[in-house]
């Protein structure tokens, strides 16, 4: 009789992270949802810090990252950071590392080199990958790799991960474990604007951060003439009675109800029109399109004028990493960490612990006549029990020497238990099973 798994003890130590340029906390919220613990967040804007503090805790440091001594920074498993994108944005001056704030990438490098997380995840606009024909991205990967990290990058679209918004962003991921990095796999059907925010329109007073803009009748009339996908400029060119205004072709575009929203940017108050009402989006509607839960409260001014300090609620929302996408990135990082952390403790035992009812050779299994009890007990019952009790989304590392019979009968065993799962067979002989939502 071959050895059989008796118990699998789960690893109890939580995965920790620090969040640089955290803003209001989109990245932190997503990683927290993935079961991780934030040891420290860093953000320079006081209003964004207050939003973070109200929703996520007092571990945020409101300070210029350049002034932080890394000796005071707690050690962590993962470091994340959405370093400011303006120097690399195709809509900006495109001065790269030489532009205002361009040195902040090197602040990420400083933290990674001195804090030494096992994994880092850096986020920026896709322009970072295209600027100077990819020279900045190539240099960034070279620098990060020189620190001893396996460094790779991908451009991910938030709409592919359940976020009702077409938001493409560059993610540079590295690990010091000598392993291939993991990136999340698109989940399938995209969520439309209508699905995401229609209930808000019907119950405006029941939501926080949901005060609509007060438009003049002239602006309302202009907005009313804008068809889905069009901008106010398109409407004014078509109808001269709508007046003139100094606006660009990107401004005041009406959303399609049956598609994900375009990218929710920091100034979305000037770039979007509600899909069926003649007004801009509210902060709560934009937060929904960014995948923030309704319980997440935004502090500070709703909008601000150029001379006013601090990030407004609208800017905080538009600058954030969508929490749902951050969750998926966190779950991918956990897969990589699972191969470097102490494996789940596998206890083997010799001998026949269970009867052989899983075996295809057993054509006359024992029958249990007790009502409500399965007629036969699997020799893999203890393994199935561990899978049943495991949290959804938590990877379970299976031992290398499970017999083929386990995998033959796994689908049927999980189907009887109404468990949906994903199984990955790894080159090294191990397998990872993850419970998924039905």
Image (cartoon, rainbow, N blue to C red):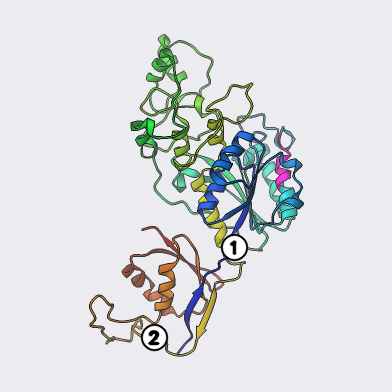
Identify the disc placed on residue 337: 1
Q: Residues within 10 Å of mark 1 (few under 14, many from 20)?
A: many
Q: Residue at x 66, y 59 (%)?
A: 118
**Residue 396, position in %: x, y?**
49, 68
Magenta stretch secondary structure, dominant: helix
- Residue 95 percent coordinates (x, y): 70, 33
Q: At which x and y percent is residue 215?
A: 44, 18
> Does 106 lie within the magenta span?
yes
Tell me how far mark 2 sits from mark 1, CA to CA.
33 Å
- Please name the residue that numbered disc 2 is placed on: 354
Picture layout, residue 72 above or below residue 2 = above
- Looking at the picture, does residue 11 appear above or below residue 256? below
Residue in the picture at 47% in, 18% down: 233
| Residue 89 visible, this angle | no
Helix, strand or loop at disc 2? loop
User: Does 294 lie within the magenta span?
Assistant: no
- Which residues lie in the magenta part? 101-108
State the residue at coordinates (53%, 18%). Answer: 247
| Side of 243 relative to 365 (left or right) | right
Q: Is residue 410 left or right of residue 326?
A: left
Q: Quadrant of residue 62?
A: top right
Q: Are marks 2 and 1 in contact (CB under 8 Å)?
A: no
Is the N terminus in the top left, top right, bottom left or bottom right quadrant? bottom left
SS for tag 1? Answer: helix
Image quarter hosting the C terminus = bottom left
- Return the residue nearer the eye: 211 or 138: 211
Label 2 crowd (10 A; few <14 / some 14-19 / many >=20): some
Q: Residue at x 42, y 18 (%)?
A: 235
Mark number for residue 25? none
Using the rendered image of the protein, determine whether residue 430 is visible from the camera's viewpoint: yes
Total count of labels: 2
Q: Left or right: 416 with respect to 264? A: left
């Amino acid at each position: 009789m071959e050895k059989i798994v008796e118990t699998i003890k789960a690893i109890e130590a939580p995965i920790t992270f620090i969040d640089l340029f955290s803003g209001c906390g989109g990245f932190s919220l997503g990683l927290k949802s993935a079961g991780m613990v934030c040891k420290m967040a860093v953000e320079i804007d006081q209003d964004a810090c207050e939003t973070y503090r109200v929703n996520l805790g007092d571990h945020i440091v409101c300070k210029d990252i350049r002034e932080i001594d890394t000796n005071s920074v707690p050690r962590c498993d993962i470091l994340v950071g959405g370093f400011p994108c303006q120097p690399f944005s195709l809509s900006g001056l495109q001065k790269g590392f030489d532009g205002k704030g361009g040195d902040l990438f090197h602040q990420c490098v400083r933290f990674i080199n001195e804090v030494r997380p096992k994994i880092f995840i850096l986020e920026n606009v896709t322009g970072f990958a295209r600027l100077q024909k990819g020279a900045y991205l190539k240099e960034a990967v070279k620098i990060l790799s020189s620190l001893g990290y396996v460094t790779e990058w991908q451009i991910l679209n938030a709409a592919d991960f359940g976020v009702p918004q077409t938001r493409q962003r560059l993610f540079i991921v590295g690990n010091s474990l000598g392993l291939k990095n993991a990136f999340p796999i698109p989940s399938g059907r995209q969520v439309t604007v209508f699905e995401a925010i229609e209930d808000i329109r019907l119950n405006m007073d029941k939501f926080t951060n949901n005060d609509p803009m007060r438009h003049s009748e002239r602006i309302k009339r202009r907005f009313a003439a804008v068809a889905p996908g069009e901008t106010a400029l398109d409407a004014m060119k078509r109808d001269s009675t709508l007046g003139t205004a100094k606006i660009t072709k990107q401004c005041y575009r009406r959303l399609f109800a049956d598609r994900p929203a375009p990218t929710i940017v920091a100034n979305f108050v000037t770039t979007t029109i509600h899909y069926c009402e003649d007004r801009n989006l509210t902060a709560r509607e934009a937060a929904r399109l960014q995948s923030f839960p309704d319980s997440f409260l935004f502090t500070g001014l709703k909008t601000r004028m150029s001379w006013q300090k601090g990030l407004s609620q609208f800017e905080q929302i538009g600058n954030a990493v969508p929490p749902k996408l951050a969750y998926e990135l966190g779950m991918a990082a956990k897969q990589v960490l699972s191969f470097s952390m102490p494996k789940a403790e596998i206890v083997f035992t010799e001998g026949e612990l269970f009867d052989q009812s899983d075996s295809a050779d057993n054509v006359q299994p024992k029958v249990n006549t007790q009502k409500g009890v399965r007629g036969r007990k699997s020799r893999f019952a203890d393994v199935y029990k561990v899978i049943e009790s495991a949290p959804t989304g938590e990877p379970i590392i299976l031992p290398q020497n499970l017999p083929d019979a386990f995998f033959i009968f796994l689908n049927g065993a999980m189907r009887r238990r109404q468990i949906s799962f994903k199984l990955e067979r790894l080159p090294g002989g191990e397998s990872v099973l993850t419970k998924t939502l039905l």
